[in-house]
Amino acid sequence: MAKVPQRKLLLSEIQLGMRVKLPLSWTNHPFLFNRVDISSAAQIEMIRGLGVPYVLLLSELNPASEVVEEDENVEDEIAAEPERDLKADTRKAIRLSQKRFLENVNNCRNVFGKIVSDPEGAYRLSAALVEDLLSHLQEVEKPFLTLVGMDDSDVSVTQHGVSVAVLAMMMGHALDLSPRELRDIALGSLLHDIGKLKVPDVIRRKRGALTPHEANYLQMHPNFAYDMLNRSGLFPKEVLHIVLHHHEFIDGSGFPDGLTDHKIPITTQIVSLANDYDQQLSGQQISSPQVALGYLFKNRATKHAESLIAILVKILGIYPPGTIVRLSDDSVAKVMMTTKEVSQPQVWACKEDGSEASLRFLSDEGVTVQKAIKAEELSEGAIRTLQVDKGVSFYFSSLQT
């Protein structure tokens, strides 16, 4: 990243690849951080709609860099801010969840990078990452889910792994599983797709239907992952089972071994379900988290235990984070965080044209969600404001309720 002297930048001068700072309080703009890495034209349009005459240019970014960088002082800034009302606390919680998600995606990427060359180092890093996840899960008595993600619509293997770990750990927590079982679930989730590193990109990233040969090769990724991890002799057999069998279904129709329910431990069943759900989003087969939930009911009812699907539904709520909805006051919104009131989640809302964006607490306003809607039903302004094209991932909320 090339540092440049900080200077005022006219809105007409903003370009892709820049890092800029918004001259606004974090309560007065739709971004999660005041510092914004400009990676899309939609972000530029959103900044131009904020009514500010300039932004501060911080640096030029290296577009080829894969390392996720965020404001290093965010957690200190959050801790230092004085007590505020529920809206301010919620916004801080969303920012903190996003920061932690990005950090853990980077940590997971580091684990992947060491698994062959330095397996002991990879194991130590992965164990530390699991402890972070467990501490974040247990930070509040009743954890909820927060929408997190990156600017790209495509979700990486490591992003998917962290999101699956969060969903699976929430399910395990709801079932009162032991800390050891939660650790196995977390580690198995993080590493379950590491075998895809051995699958050619042309197959892994293909948008259209795979040929039979390509599909068979892709279905080998659990075996590739198991071999990579088992070779080190460091990972528990429970974790290896999750990695090898995260595509097994209780009706025996999964792979690689066609196991049925009595041969699949509860930890593996949980990760299989969390992966099946999140894969609908990370693979871009389905863009709406609510539609993905409906897909499970319609197409996966015999493949996962009914009791586990019920738990996942309870965790996600009627309108999971990332769902685009229409409110009873005719505003449109994106669900940001689940709450006790399933029909009144925390949302980022705007008018039909995308104006007057704000974080809203529906339970305080007496407003409810009328229905989930498709992106095609939104105006261009609303699409930009709600950042509909961003990928959907999940992280624990640190908000005390």
Image (cartoon, rainbow, N blue to C red):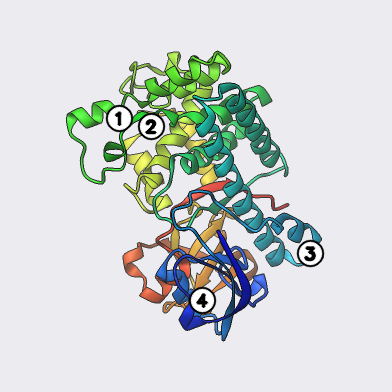
Res. 81 mark: 3
User: Residue drawn 54% across and 34% down?
Assistant: 168
How busy is the neighbourhood of tag 1: few (under 14 within 10 Å), some, or many (20 plus)? some
The residues bearing labels 2 and 4 have C-alpha atoms spaced at a distance of 37 Å
Q: How many marks?
A: 4
Are dots 1 and 4 in contact, CB under 8 Å?
no
The residues bearing labels 1 and 2 have C-alpha atoms spaced at a distance of 7 Å
The residues bearing labels 4 and 3 have C-alpha atoms spaced at a distance of 25 Å
Amino acid at the residue labelled 4: Ile
Q: Which residue is mark 1?
A: 218
Q: Identify which residue, 305 or 270, lies in the foreground.
A: 270
Q: Left of 160 or right of it: where is 315?
A: right
The residues bearing labels 3 and 1 have C-alpha atoms spaced at a distance of 48 Å
Q: Which residue is mark 2?
A: 196
User: Residue drawn 81% across and 65% down?
Assistant: 82
Q: Which residue is mark 4?
A: 47
User: Residue drawn 69% across and 50% down?
Assistant: 398
Q: Residue 23, relative to residue 336: is it above or below? A: below
Residue 317 pos. (x, y %): 52, 49
